[in-house]
Amino acid sequence: MIGLTMVDKMKRTQFLGREFLTWMLFKAATEEGVFRLDEDGEVQMLFERAVTLEGDNPAREMSTIKVDDPTDSAEVMLSLRLGKKVSKARLLLESEGKEFAFTLDAASLALRSVTLPDSMAMDHTEVMAEKADFATELEETLQKLFMGFIGLRLNLDAWSLEVSKMAKWIGPWGKE
């Protein structure tokens, strides 16, 4: 039996990134973007300005919508009703008084255009160390959010309940 290449593995699991971003959009719209991180408290994830949604055929079914609040956009909701899922989004993460802005790509879960909180250090070396700590904090927080989503996704009963809530939020023409 031939083993799967890394590219094959990525292609087979790309849908999880789109489901993750779509689920986060749902939470941002219905629960003000508040996510519990178990013992680590909670964070708030807000969608800003631009969101890209894709259908089953991204070459023909892709929409990039630029609005002030994507969670309250009729165009975004229509795209969701048509069965599209979020494939890229500009996000603002608020955690313990710090703000991180970035774009998250669902296909690879890659971060782009990252803006870290301002450093309070005076020395250049300390500034760089603090920025590195902020980058690590952002990565770890996103990993916790994604792993929480995967845990939910793997729990059949919990995921079925979540999907029914999302379908109700999307509206009468929503697809699973």
Image: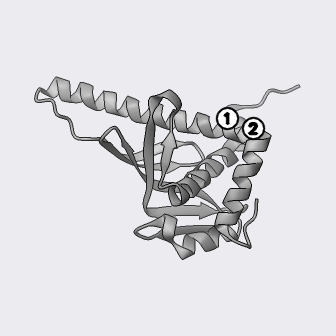
Say which element carries label 1: helix
Q: Residue at x 69, y 48 (%)?
A: 15
User: Badge 2 is on which residue?
Assistant: 155
Q: Quadrant of residue 95?
A: top left
Q: Is residue 155 left or right of residue 29?
A: right
Q: Quadrant of residue 60?
A: bottom right
Q: Residue at x 32, y 27 (%)?
A: 133
Q: Is residue 40 left or right of residue 166?
A: left
Q: Position of residue 106 (x, y in %)?
A: 58, 48
- Of the residues shown, which amino acid type is indicated by label 2? Asn
The image's mark for residue 151 is 1
Residue 10: tell me if it is visible: no
Q: Nearer the viewer, residue 18 or 97?
A: 97
Q: With respect to residue 141, does 104 lie above or below?
A: below
Q: Nearer the viewer, residue 104 or 141?
A: 141
Marks 2/1 in contact by CB < 8 Å: the verdict is: yes
- Of the residues shown, which amino acid type is indicated by label 1? Gly
Say which element carries label 2: loop
Q: Position of residue 139 (x, y in %)?
A: 45, 34
Q: Position of residue 172 (x, y in %)?
A: 73, 73
